[in-house]
Image: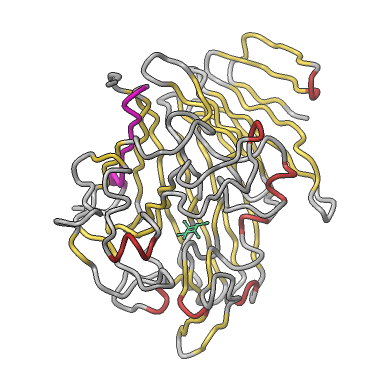
Amino acid sequence: MRVLAFIPLVAVLMTAGCVKKIQGVKGSVNKQEFGKTARGEAVDLYILTNKNGVEAAITNYGGIVVRLKTADARGRLADITLGFDTLQGYLGSHPYFGAIIGRYGNRIGKAKFTLDGHEYKLAANNGENSLHGGIYGFDKKVWAAVAESDEQGQRLTLTTQSADGEEGYPGKLDVTVVYTLTDDDELRIDYRATTDKPTVINLTNHTYFNLAGQGSGDVLDTEMTIAADRFTPVDAGLIPTGELRSVEGTPFDFRKPSTIGARIEDGSEQIQLGLGYDHNYVINRTAPGLALAARAVYPKNGRALEVWTTEPGVQFYTGNFLDGKVLGKNLNAYQRRSGFCLETQHFPDSPNRPDFPSTTLRPGAEYRSTTVWKFRSEAIRK
Ligand code: GLA
């Protein structure tokens, strides 16, 4: 067990779970044992806390964000992410709660793609398509972890290597994901990767948010804004048709705040295909760098989340496949639409769509992607 803290002021020894906690005005990083995988690999939980008490608990199993405690308008902290209390839950079957997704977030059509004239076959784990990196994706890897604390914030650096051919993808890939919790109440995720052969890559994080607090019902009353004039309509397998369609006059128009539930059952073709929202939006951007992708607010407690990213797209997914069968934290049965995801990404199926922004990574180049979650609050509206 290691404890890292920047100017620690108070040290408290908690006996339960043998957790030693050092709290400082500048925040702290605590490391505790989280359990072992079926293969016997030891896994830890890193609890990053900032000076305001905002907490991000992240495990090096799958780089999963296990807990995220942020403040509402009254300053009350609540855990806003769906997931499990223990590692055991994450080792079982679950819909990617909080996880880092790789090598390719979202779907690749017919589980294959051609790069430089070679066809690569992937595991079909979603009908005939490949989803979220395949059967043994980055969400199931035990990552090497280093925790640090300095004036930039509390930082967890996760690294892993993916072998040439893993899950069918070419190239030995070295990957680094850095989570930084700042005193500005932001969790920044920096993704980096290099390869020794041409490959494709699309990393993201699959956290499910509920701004009322996880386990407190559906997210239909949450107000969503998505900074996108266009989205990528899909076919029955949720593979983009290739069209970049205007959101104008459709239930996909979130350019002005709208509750998630207002149009989610409107019966239009794309809503039916997604069983709700499960679509990639083309983020409006005027320059490279971080752009606002989306803003969500729960009007009844004023808790807000902004998602900024360097990526061209964001998958807005409203937990349509949650069905109450997964028992999560405090034995909460996560029902349909009890969380939403904003998965920043390149567009789905890009390896088969030369007209989409490229997901190709070549030797000598570095894959770089950054997403920032800004935890905010605003006046309560009843
Ligand atoms: C993504 C997909 C959804 C679903 C979830 C996991 O968000 O877009 O269709 O597969 O992952 O359940």
The vertical placement of 60 against 38, above or below, is above
Number of labels in the image equals 0
Q: Quadrant of residue 274?
A: bottom left
Q: Is residue 233 above or below residue 339?
A: below
Q: Nearer the viewer, residue 317 or 1?
A: 317
Q: Is residue 320 left or right of residue 37?
A: left
Residue beneath the point at 64% across and 74% down? 164
**Residue 226 vertical position relative to residue 18 in the rendered view, above or below:** below
Give the image quarter of residue 297. Answer: top left
Residue 277 lies, in percent from the top left, at 36, 54
User: What residue is drawn where x is 50% and y is 77%?
Assistant: 198
How far from the left and from the top, in percent, is residue 54? 50, 24
Magenta span includes 287: no
Q: Is residue 39 left or right of residue 73?
A: right
Q: Position of residue 350 (x, y in %)?
A: 39, 72
Q: Point out the residue furthest to the right here.
A: 40
Question: Residue 293 placed where, x, y %?
Answer: 30, 47
Quadrant of the drawing holding the N terminus: top right
Instruction: Judge by depth and name the residue closer to the eye, 315 or 104.
Output: 315
The residue at 50%/55% (across/down) is: 321
The colouring scheme, among rainbow, by chain, secondary structure or one colour, is secondary structure
Dominant SS of magenta comes to strand
Query: Residue lying furthest top in this view?
Result: 10
**Span colored in magenta:** 290-300
Give the residue at the far bottom of this rendering. Answer: 117
In the rendered view, tell whether residue 245 sits above or below residue 73: below
Look at the image and tell me in which quarter the C terminus lies: top left
